[in-house]
Amino acid sequence: MVKFSDDVTQGVEKSAARAMLRAVGLKDEDFQKFQVGIVSAGNEVTPCNLTGPELSEHAKEGVNGDVSAGLIFSTIAVSDGISMGHEGMRASLVSREVIADSVELVMHAERFDGMVTIAGCDKSLPGMLMASARINRPAIFLYGGSSLPGEYKGKDISIVDVFEGIGALEKGLISEEELYEIECAACPGQGSCAGMFTANTMASVGEAIGMSLPGTASIQAEDKRLRKAAKETGDQLNYLLKNDLKPRDIMTKEAFHNAITTVLSLGGSTNAVLHLLAIAYEAKVDLTIDIFDELARDVPHLADMKPFGKYHMVDLDKIGGVPVVSKILLENKLIDPDCMTVTGKTVGENLENIEIPKDQDVVYFPDNPISKEGGLAILRGSLSPNGSVVKVAGIEIDTFKGPANVFDSEQEALDALFNNKINKGEVVVIRNEGPKGGPGMREMLQITAAMKGAGLGKDVLLITDGRFSGGTTGLCIGHVTPESFDNGPIAICETGDEISLDLKKRELNLNVDEDEIEKRLKKYTNPEPRYNSGVLNKYSKLVTGADKGAVTG
């Protein structure tokens, strides 16, 4: 393999570079070894990435030895939970691109031969996998761990319960004191949100696609096993270096299908569609949104996980974690056993000794699933010609029809909800929140949770060119493409227009004559951009549509 680090460690002309490296602790013998970057999104901004610095040290211990010398660096992270429901959320998806770019830049400049990547929250996970695929030097991923659920009045709760509590308070269903008690109990410690929300979904992806050591996706952030796993992850990077096993050798088209199948069986986050498309783009794998729906027709929904089910990630961990889910899928010929993984073994070889516990109800079996079809669906029709995404897990209806109640931003919709201007039977349309038009494709847990908390979760259909939290439940359709800013039909939808949903047919339609739609689109002009400078302006000019993964190229 090419030893990139020779660019900074070999030859008299590299004396200055070696002098700098001596200052950070490297010695003569280290200059003959592989140089390894150990990168985390560790920070105190969010509990999701609190473990990053500590895990980096353990990973470095595993890396360091006769083969490699490890050096730690870091990247940014944005807390979705903290930035939710206000202008700050526009930065969230953008941060995924910044994370991937920043890791690439350090790897390119410092000439590291390989890397260990560590991340906890929603965008740092796919950002690390995107960077690994783009750079394509030996790499391995470690999840920073999930949190334990909180407890309130004898029930397990999470951050989603706080957002739902806000809506309940506005409708007078709970008191301010009760909301305060929920707030204080929801996040008991470090780690990513406890349910099968976006972070735990993407951690499961990291394992299912072959980029993480088996069993590491479900370990809690405060568990001592995670520190051991970090050291083992660092040590395994040495194997990858010695054998020149690179991310694109692992993240093949078949591996992506395995990952999608796993997400569908877990009832994972809709954000997985966006992120897997982006990772595939970097891995140079031809992946479209249609494959999610094709696989969903044949992959049953098996895991009874929050936000719609009973259990959190800790409960999945207790029965054996993602490997148990993978073994069930393998035994039913739903995943490819021949895909290579970072262990140096195939998926099938990794799962040979995995036993499936029978006396549990966290994960069901294909002969008696929660649902015969996977937890996500792709919809098309006159309102979303290029596709849209819905989490069907937990939805009890197949059809919905009603008049549109149209808003030009999430905040407008929230104000309407709190002023009793959203009614049962309506289709709430939120536009100008796509990747370009937002910019940043805001996540809308604030409005979806508030609607559920207000008792409207089953009686109102929400449609947007933005996206949703992994904690969102109910009748919510996101990623509508083309987005409003790209002259998609959502741009010209008017209050009172009839909209219909048919999940079985996978259709989302604006029931307005085609001629009228064309007439409106010809007259339509985009609103003025929200940002005329800075990173959000730059992002809006570069980003693709959600159906392409919202990548910046």
Image (spheres, grey):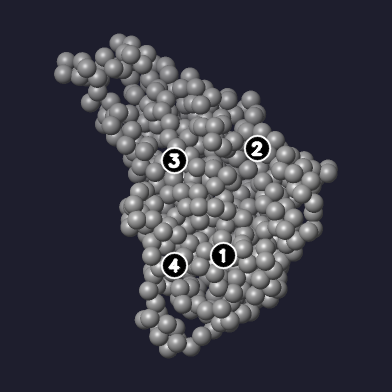
Q: Residue at image x 40%, y 47%?
A: 97
Per the rendering, the mark at residue 147 is 2
> Going from the N terminus, do you reach mark 1 or mark 4 first?
1
- Looking at the figure, which quarter contains the N terminus? top left
Looking at the rendered image, the disc whose residue lies closer to the viewer, 2 or 1, is: 1
Q: Check whether the beta carbons of the residues at disc 3 and disc 1 lie within 8 A of each other.
A: no
Q: Is residue 366 above or below residue 512?
A: above
Q: What residue type is labelled 1?
A: Glu
Circle 1 residue: 412
Q: Is residue 450 left or right of residue 275?
A: right
The residue tagged with tag 3: helix, strand or loop?
Answer: helix
Q: Can you identify the residue that label 3 sits on?
A: 128
Sooner in the amino-acid sequence: mark 3 or mark 2 = 3
Total tally of numbered discs in the picture: 4
- Front position in the image: 80 or 118: 80
The kind of secondary structure element at disc 2 is loop
Furthest residue toward left: 13
Viewer-closest of 327 and 208: 208
Q: In screen coordinates, is 61 left or right of 305?
A: left
Q: What residue type is labelled 3?
A: Met
Q: Where is residue 415 in the image (x, y as percent from the top left)?
A: 62, 63
* Sequence-first disc among 4 and 3: 3
Q: Quadrant of residue 99?
A: top left
Is label 2 or label 4 in front? 4
Mark 2 vs mark 1: which is more N-terminal? Answer: 2
Cα distance between the residues tagged 3 and 1: 34 Å
Q: In terms of sequence position, does the residue under pointer 2 or pointer 4 come before the other? A: 2
Residue 483: mark in rendering: 4
At x 38%, y 61%, the residue is 529
* Closer mark to the observer between disc 4 and disc 3: 4
Separation of residues labelled 1 and 4 (CA atoms): 18 Å
Q: Where is residue 95 in the image (x, y as percent from the top left)?
A: 44, 45
